[in-house]
Image (cartoon, coloured by chain):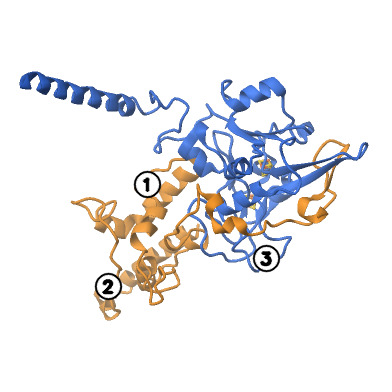
Amino acid sequence: MAVMYNYVRSLILLAGMALLGLPLVAQSETPLPVIPEASSRFSAEQACVEPTEEMRKNHMNYILHQRDETMHKGIRTRQHSLEECINCHVPVEDKDGQPMRITNKDHFCSSCHTYAAVKVDCFQCHADRPVKTTAFHPLTSQASEKTAFHHSDAGETVSADTLEVLAEEGKLQ
Amino acid sequence: MTHKSEINSSRRQFLNGSAIAAGLAIAPGVMLHQVAQAKPADQAVTSDKRWGMLIDTNKCSKGCDACVRGCQTENGWGENETKSGPNQVAQWIRKVELRDTSTGFTKSLPLMCQHCEHPPCVDVCPTGASFKRADGIVLVDKHICIGCRYCMMACPYKARSFIHEDLQDQLPVAPRGKGTVESCTLCVHRVDKDGENAIPACAEACNAEGHEAFVFGDLKNPNSRISQELAKHGGTQIRADLGLNVGIRYRGI
Ligand code: SF4
Ligand code: SF4
């Protein structure tokens, strides 16, 4: 929703500038964004998963389409996957040697989005930098050492009348 | 001789080539040697399958929470919520203790989203964010969720959590964020990848402890291990009286 809103808003802004007769070249006083280089090429002929000009203009449509396909139909092709965008475009490190976060204005996404004044809200939920996932090896991970969390509400009935939820494990101990 | 070995080697190549073709070209759908395996990544899930899980509470040990920790590690919940209180922090799966009030007998079991065939959470959701996939997995589309929490109220199993704070470093397999509701996904990313051979993280962790209380599989396939076990030994639905026809079945309660 917010993505669409921002997109529409930027279109309206552009239309507004056109109406006011402000030539877009007047923007040239704002320095163009410095876009970090991707870490690999899609193919020998093509830099990104679609022609670069197409991606610059329409990446949001590809991501939006893929989002619904994956979420609702379980289609998990990699070509237009946001995770792969991040893996390829965001390994660039900041001055502390960490992959950049979206809050860093040199992050691949923010570099352009700051310039275009379009808010990007993907990263409220999605990882903004490559994540070395422990998925598929959960038991070898350090994280499995941490304590589990427990809610503390006892006494709710979940089963037939004679079965009463006493408490969760953690509370009884 | 040379001539003959050339023929042989090219013939071998041809055979190799055709063997590969048999494995690949018959897809989509029909993989010769991958009958029970995953769908190709570019194909949508269908209602030919209904994923479910059978949990044998006789094998589930009191005081063990390996399944809970396995889920946390796999899906990244609970760890990065530092500002939420103990009643606010996400809980996709929890250990619950039941007591038979007439005998005092107690039982420990893991409880998570039961992946209802008729999910009340989906009924009440005003936006369509709460939905059931064709293969029976109930999910929240967080792009659409407005955080009203009706679904949390509607769920008889208290399976859902609301995220109260800004998060960072979510895992790619489980995007999650402030203002949206979430619950067990049946490790949908593993299911999409491995199909009938998938093992959800809770089950994997349980197996690693040597308890093997979980059986994951396709309830619609009579030959799957879960169907065969259900046919042989039966299984209980928690709150079967609600008529939700849940996908998570229990034994020993
Ligand atoms: S157990 Fe709760 S969250 Fe899961 S499908 Fe049923 S009503 Fe929805
Ligand atoms: S909190 Fe989200 S998923 Fe739940 S009912 Fe409201 S909009 Fe639907």
Report the amino acid beneath label 3: Ser
Residue sitting nearer the eye, A87 or A70: A87
Residue B238 in picture, x, y percent from top left: 76, 36
Tell me what hue chain B is rendered in.
Answer: blue
Residue sitting nearer the eye, B56 or A84: B56
Q: Residue under label 2, please give it.
A: A24
Q: Residue under label 1, please give it.
A: A78
Q: Residue under label 3, please give it.
A: B84
SS for dot 2: helix
SS for dot 3: loop
Quadrant of the image occupied by residue B85: bottom right
Residue B83 drawn above or below residue A72: below
Label 3 chain ID: B
Query: Mark number for residue B253?
Result: none
Q: The orange chain is which one?
A: A
Disc 2 Cβ-to-ligand 2 distance below 8 Å: no
Residue at the spot 69% in from the left edge and 31% down from the top edge: B245
**Are the residues flagged by discs 3 and 2 from a single subunit?**
no
Residue at the limit of the structure toward the bottom, as seen here: A29
Label 2 chain ID: A
SS for dot 1: loop
Report the amino acid beneath label 2: Leu
